[in-house]
Every structure is written in C-alpha cells, then in structure tokens.
Amino acid sequence: MGARRWSANGALVAAGSLVLTIVGACTSISSAAQRQVERATLVTKPARAVTPADIGVPFTRIWIEHDGRRLEAWAVFGADSVNTNSAVFICHGTGETLSDWVYVQRLLREEGITSFVFDYTGFGNSTGTPTAQALEADAIAAYKSFNALLPTDMRRSALGFSLGSGVLLAAFPRMQPPLDGLIVASAFSTARRAALRRRFFPGILAYLAPDTVWNNVAAIRNVNAPLRIVHSDADRAFPLSMARELARASRQPGSLIIQHGYAHNALYAKATAAQWQPLVRFIVKGS
C-alpha cells in the first residue's frame, strides 16, 4: 500500500513538474517571439541635423527625463495671426525622427495649431533601448511635457502615425488630462500582423508572439474620445482593410476617412494642405 501511494504521489509530482516545464518553455518561446516582433517593428534612426528653424519655423527644444532615459522633443507654437486655441501631440512612426516632421510642424503652425513631436527611446538623440513597454512610457511622459506648455483651456488632440498608432492607443487610457480628440493615421490592425508584412520576418515566430501588445483592434474599442481613422487606398505598408477593421471595432460609426493615391509616408514626407485638411478641421473643431 505504501509503495503504491508513493508511486501515485511520485507520478503526480512528475506530472506537475512536466506541466511547469511546458508552461515555462511556452512562456520563453512567447517572450522570444515578442522580442522578434519588436525588432521587426522598432526600426531606430540616428538624429538628423534638420530642425524647424532650418525651414524658417521658430521652435522650442525640450528634454524629457524619465525612467533613467532622456528624450528629445520639439514644440512649434501656432502662428499668432491664426488663433485656433488648438494643439496636437504627435507619436511618429518607425524609422523616423523629429527631423522627418518639420514640414508638418510648419504646415500646422500656419494653420494656427501648436504641435509637439518627440523621439522615442533609442530614436534620434533619445537614449535607451526601445521596447514596446518603453515607448508607451515615453508617450505618457512626453504627454505630460506637452500639457505643461499649454493653457488649460486649449483644445488637445493626439495623432498616432503608423507605429505611433500602437503607441498612442496603448498609452491613451493613462494620458491625463483626457484628450479632446484622437487621430490614428496609416495604422496597422495588430503589431503581430504588421511584423508579418515585413518580408525578412519569420512568420511562424510572429504567430507565437502574444497578440496583446499593440493590438489596435482591441485598444480602439476603449477609445471614448472623438476619433478619426485616416488611411490611404494606396498605402502599401498596411492595406486599407486594416483601417476598415479598426473602424468596425470603433464605437464611433463614420470615423474612417479614406484618402486616395497617397503612399504610406506621404502624410509627413510630402505634407500638403489638401491631405491634412480633414485632420486640421478635426484638430480645431472636432468634426
């Protein structure tokens, strides 16, 4: 009897150990796959010398210290001649830095809109090693600096472009004071599916990654602020079907704005008043 009891107990212990080993192995594989997704989507870029001042735009350089890291940000105030009392906080895309957004900042200044752009951890002159968690913390810290610059009665919107859509939507519930409007532009549905669109990325690893990090479809369901989803039918990085999926998940019917003929990066690389017109109207009026 004692031998049989020991045998049964030993079998239970062995089974338990096997389960723990399997769980541990799955967790390790999942973590490794998530790191691969981050490597595929977080493409850093060194700082360029171009600033808004080089194209005739006065700006304020801001350094944000948080979590042992130092982030660079640029603020450009709306032109005094066009008083809209509106400001926009921008989370840029991967493979970009502040310098890529100088023409957008000039355009917004001319429309009377104050803009604030920052470089994530490891991008441009910002220090540290980029991870999804670090970028979300960056957005929250940068948003605090953005708010410190503004009068309390100024209308506040935020724009997340491409990779920045994931950063912004993940950080949105923790951003205080609440935003008056949210724009996701050239966005992906989930980071996992975005990584799969990069040809060098091993597809099987992406499927092993958790689909909880930067899942824009899930996150957009929790957005209770006025929302616009802006996407081009000529976007070859992320297809229009991804934007339609976000629009279906949103609480706000009619939030999708489809633009025609613009490449993925056109919003900042070839910023035009025509492409920005619906975004400017939303930033200023919320409609």
Image (tube, rainbow, N blue to C red):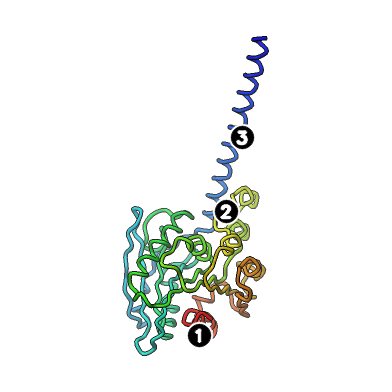
Which mark, by number, is residue 19?
none
Looking at the picture, does residue 204 appear above or below residue 136?
above
Lower position in the chain sequence, tag 1 or tag 2 = 2
Q: Nearer the viewer, mark 1 or mark 2?
A: 2
The amino acid type, in three-letter code, at marker 3 is Ile
Which mark, by number, is residue 273?
1
Which mark, by number, is residue 212?
2
Pick the front one: 195 or 221: 221
Q: Quadrant of residue 266?
A: bottom right
Pick the front one: 165 or 44: 165
Q: Nearer the viewer, mark 2 or mark 3?
A: 2
* Residue 277 percent across, percent down from the top left: 52, 84
Lower position in the chain sequence, tag 1 or tag 3 = 3
Pick the front one: 203 or 116: 116
Pick the front one: 199 or 226: 226
Crowding at label 3, few (<14), some or many (≥20) Cα neighbours within 10 Å? Answer: few
SS type, badge 1: helix
The amino acid type, in three-letter code, at marker 2 is Thr
The amino acid type, in three-letter code, at marker 1 is Ala
* Residue 60 percent across, percent down from the top left: 31, 74
Left/right placement of residue 283 relative to residue 148 reads right
Which mark, by number, is residue 22?
3
Q: Nearer the viewer, mark 1 or mark 3?
A: 3
Looking at the picture, does residue 229 appear above or below residue 11?
below
